[in-house]
Amino acid sequence: MGEHNVHSSIDQKNKAGFIKHLLDDIKALEIMLEQNLIEDDIVRIGAEQEFCLVDRNWRPANNAMEMLKTINDSHFTTELAKFNLEINLDPLELKKDCFSQVESEINRLLNKAKEAGIDSETKILLTGILPTISKRHLELEYMTPNPRYSALNAILRLQRGTDFELHIRGVDELSIHHDSVLFEACNTSFQMHLQVPPQDFISSYNWAQAISGPILGICTNSPLLFGRELWSETRIALFRQSLDIRSASHALKDRRARVSFSDHWAYGSVAQIFKNDIAEHKVVISRDIAANSLSELKKGNIPKLQALNLHNGTVYRWNRPCYGVGGGKPHVRIENRYIPSGPTVLDEIANFAFWAGVMIGRPTKFDNMPACMDFRDVKANFIKAARMGKDTILQWMGNSISVQDLIIKELLPIAHSGLEKANVDKEDRERLLSVIESRAKGITPSVWNIKNYRLLRKNMKIDSALRALTKTMYDNQQHGSPIHEWPMLEKLPKTSEDATLVGHIMSTQLFTVGEHDLATLATNIMKWKNIHHVPVESMVGTLCGLLTWTHATKIQNLKTNGDERTVSDIMEKEVITISPKSSIKEAIRIMKKNEIGCLPVVQKEDLVGIITIKDVIEFDNGKNS
């Protein structure tokens, strides 16, 4: 996430000074563009590899800081949560065996991380969203102790004024509130950088936008969150909503989210894109800056544009323009942020070569994308691809075409041409692009995840199925084969049974009734559904009582014509509850002591589940089988 020595924008004095530097950085960039000081005679690639840390039970670990210390390598840095780390790879010139070099470096550094995790039994996993992340892993205790993260969380929370909200609908639906930006930590990506000549930046950027939908559609790897099937690439919706400071109001407002695909084609120069972002997004964090960029430029030095880069780092375009200095020379590049991590290093490098090849191989007829496509089609393609993956039907140059056909018939030939133009070794071109072709004709990571998760769910509770899926992903990653060669599960994998908390075995698919519902209706539904315990909710949605099979039987025996009793007349009002963080042993003790058959599970006054004697028996049987 970049610079660590930052201030919250609440500090008006620091903010004012920072904004002056920000405006001067824009002026300095424009001068460098006018005077042709930006490097334009070489193309380099770079990447950032994010990965998850999991413990011996396949759940998120909490030891990123300890791992970072043990690894002791400047390529590694922290991420927002303590269960993630990131590798910043060395830039390379786009030529010859550059992709093999990137592949080799990633494997070398990941092996270094694996070795560092041996003593703590921490494993390394490449995935877009770690399946076993739960709500409890998104509490502030899991946030990396870093001034930038805490400042960002504080100011975004303040600017929003209310809790962050997630509303994502796929096969399942997720609707939940959270009090911090830590939902963003669920996202794990493989970010790819491509240096672009400044005079070609706008054409390249618009082309990058145009190809985002089909490329995302073939790379999706994040279909699950909290055990729910959502989008093929759930990261797209999750990232946008987890950092969204806009709140609903009675007025119809058009405000761009900080995580955005944009609403129009880029124009002018790269400086204009930065200007638009400054105009549309408030400064949320600042930092002390010693050297003024205009002054440095007058001295003949190349400025780092620190204020611009810091602000740019808080505006999350899926294709992000970037400015940097390497070897004393300034450059501009495009950062592709929408590709998920995993499922293997080979898959990632194939994605990288494919994207870079399509970018470099852009046919001249696409130099002016606004004349070729309506931007709203491009944006719609991206959203549809995130939802549906390879099954998406895209609008491409005025025609409807499937992701598979567009990849195979048009984009792969462009990628081959582009990599050949860049003098990338034929062996690497054919090896990596064949992975994309096989995936287009076969199975994508998101489809593999969903098919195997559904198989596991036939015989396992959600928590056990998610852990089994995570273990299977890890085992397959160790072989290094690309996703289209991964076998489908034919039998249930064995995982160490570590379910110790109520949250691990509770039922979350709840049926509830309202306190003012007719009692006869509620009890009949219990009979029809064979439900023995039903939580009762008040008008505002809080737990206020419990109906049991005893109540249902009693009213069935006593009911008369015209019975107008409500649920509140017959429910148990003194309800004993438990937290999802409580131990299963504690739940058993409470049920035995009070001679009750269930416990509603409550977190921060919200009903999140129910644990019954049946759940405990099934848990014991599974543990001892």
Image (cartoon, grey):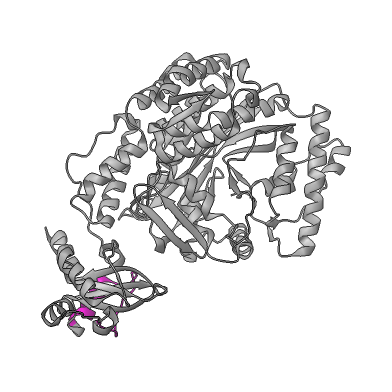
Q: Quadrant of the C terminus?
A: bottom left
Q: Position of residue 323 (x, y in %)?
A: 69, 37
In depth, the one of 318 and 127 nearer the eye is 318
Could you tell whether 477 is left or right of 203 in the image? left
Residue found 20% across the figure and 84% down from its top: 594
Q: Is residue 576 magenta?
A: yes
* Quadrant position of residue 521: bottom left
Q: Position of residue 520 (x, y in %)?
A: 20, 75
Q: Position of residue 515 (x, y in %)?
A: 32, 77
Does residue 133 sit above or below 582 in this rendering? above
Q: Position of residue 549 (x, y in %)?
A: 16, 75
Q: Is residue 79 visible?
A: no
Residue found 27% across the figure and 55% down from its top: 462
In depth, the one of 317 and 325 nearer the eye is 317
* Quadrant position of residue 392: top left
Magenta segment: 571-592
Q: Is residue 239 visible?
A: yes
Residue found 60% across the figure and 50% down from its top: 257
In depth, the one of 64 and 223 nearer the eye is 223
Does residue 175 sit above or below 108 in this rendering? below
Could you tell whether 94 is left or right of 234 in the image? right
Looking at the image, the residue that sits furthest to the right is 298
Does residue 605 sit above or below 444 in this rendering? below
Residue found 29% across the figure and 85% down from its top: 574
Q: Is residue 281 magenta?
A: no
Could you tell whether 366 is left or right of 85 in the image? right
Looking at the image, the residue that sits furthest to the front is 562
Does residue 429 sit above or below 325 in this rendering? above
